[in-house]
């Protein structure tokens, strides 16, 4: 089993809010839907890519 988190960013005006999915999140879901590897570009600049917890 592989665990994956969806690429997310926080709203710059309200850090407690996560905006609607962007293109990176769609890449994750599209890859999962067709059982393909998730592109590395999907996680670039996401909160999980920062290596820190908020």
Image: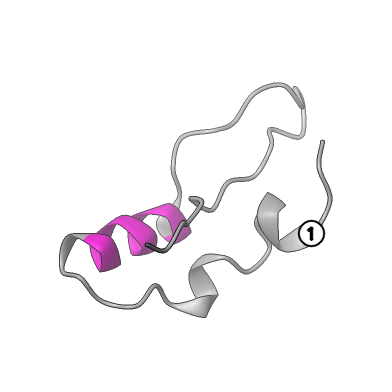
Above or below — where is 42 with respect to 46?
Answer: below
* Left or right: 45 in relation to 32: right
Secondary structure mainly formed by the magenta segment: helix
Q: In which quarter of the image is residue 28?
A: bottom left
Q: What residue do we see at 64% from left, 23% from top?
A: 17
The quarter of the rendered structure image containing the N terminus is: bottom left
Q: What residue do we see at 58% from left, 46% from top?
A: 8
- How far across and down, in percent of the image, does residue 6 sit? 48, 50
Q: What residue do we see at 68% from left, 63% from top?
A: 45
Magenta segment range? 24-32
Residue 29 counted in the magenta span: yes
Comparing 10 with 48, the one in front is: 48
- How far across and down, in percent of the image, does residue 4 sit? 47, 57
Above or below — where is 30 with respect to 41?
Answer: above
Q: Quadrant of residue 19?
A: top right
* Left or right: 41 in relation to 34: right
Answer few, some or many: residues within 10 Å of disc 1's Cα (few below 14, many 20 plus, some between 14 and 19).
few
According to the image, label 1 marks what residue? 50
Q: Which colour scheme is used?
A: one colour
Residue 19 counted in the magenta span: no
């Amino acid at each position: 089993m592989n665990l994956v988190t969806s690429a997310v960013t926080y709203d710059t005006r309200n850090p407690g809010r996560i905006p609607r999915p962007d293109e990176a999140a769609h890449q994750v879901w599209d890859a999962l839907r067709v059982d393909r590897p998730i592109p590395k570009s999907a996680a670039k600049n996401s909160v999980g890519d920062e290596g820190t917890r908020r």
